[in-house]
Image (spheres, grey):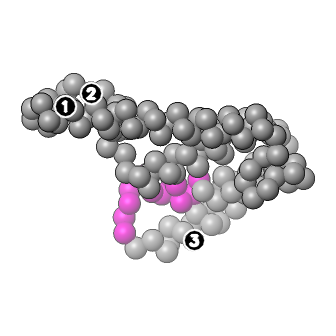
Amino acid sequence: MSDSNVANDMGAVARYLAEIKNGTLVLWCYLIWYLTTVLFYFDPAPTIWVNALGISAIIGVGLSLSVTSKGGRWQTFRLFMMPFGVSSFSALIKGQGFMFVFSPVLIELLTGFGLCALFVALVAYFRCKLSRLMRE
């Protein structure tokens, strides 16, 4: 089966998941972990989010200037998103009893790990599906 037929057999999202690189898979798990923590500890205080945006802008520009290769919009987005995530994450968990990045509450840990595991399983499923389609 030709690559174009494989592309026709799989939707765009499925194809993206099937072809995702391991490093990008880890970054998606970081995002899942971050969003899970935000879900449990969201604080609408504007200072958290404004400060995170400011840090994101300052660090994002510095990171963009330090990158020699052109990675496109996705890479640029990540260079700004990561400092935003780090600063807002640390503000949200301050004083909550976290050890490293892990919540002291079991259901929160299980939710974060479970969602990441589900995502990894979904990627594995589509990788297997793509592999089978390529062999046919």
Q: Secondary structure at mark 2?
A: loop
Q: Amino acid at mark 3?
A: Gly
Q: Secondary structure at mark 1?
A: helix
Residue 66 belongs to the span the image colors magenta: no
- Residue picked out by circle 3: 62
Given residues 112 and 13, the one toward you in this image is 112
Identify which residue is drawn at 72% across, 41% down: 109
Please provide percent x and percent y for residue 7: 21, 32
Q: Are marks 2 and 1 in contact (CB under 8 Å)?
A: yes
In the drawing, what numbered circle is on residue 13? none
- Residue picked out by circle 2: 10
Does 89 sit above or below residue 15? below
Q: Nearer the viewer, mark 2 or mark 1?
A: 1
Q: Nearer the viewer, mark 1 or mark 3?
A: 1
Q: Neighbour class for label 1 at 10 Å: few (<14), some, many (≥20)?
A: some
Q: Secondary structure at mark 3?
A: helix
Does 44 sit above or below residue 77? above
Identify which residue is drawn at 23% across, 37% down: 131
Does 98 sit above or below residue 116? below
Q: Quadrant of residue 115?
A: top right
Looking at the rendered structure, the number of numbered marks drawn on it comes to: 3
- Residue picked out by circle 1: 133
Q: Is residue 64 left or right of residue 115?
A: left
Q: Amino acid at mark 1?
A: Leu
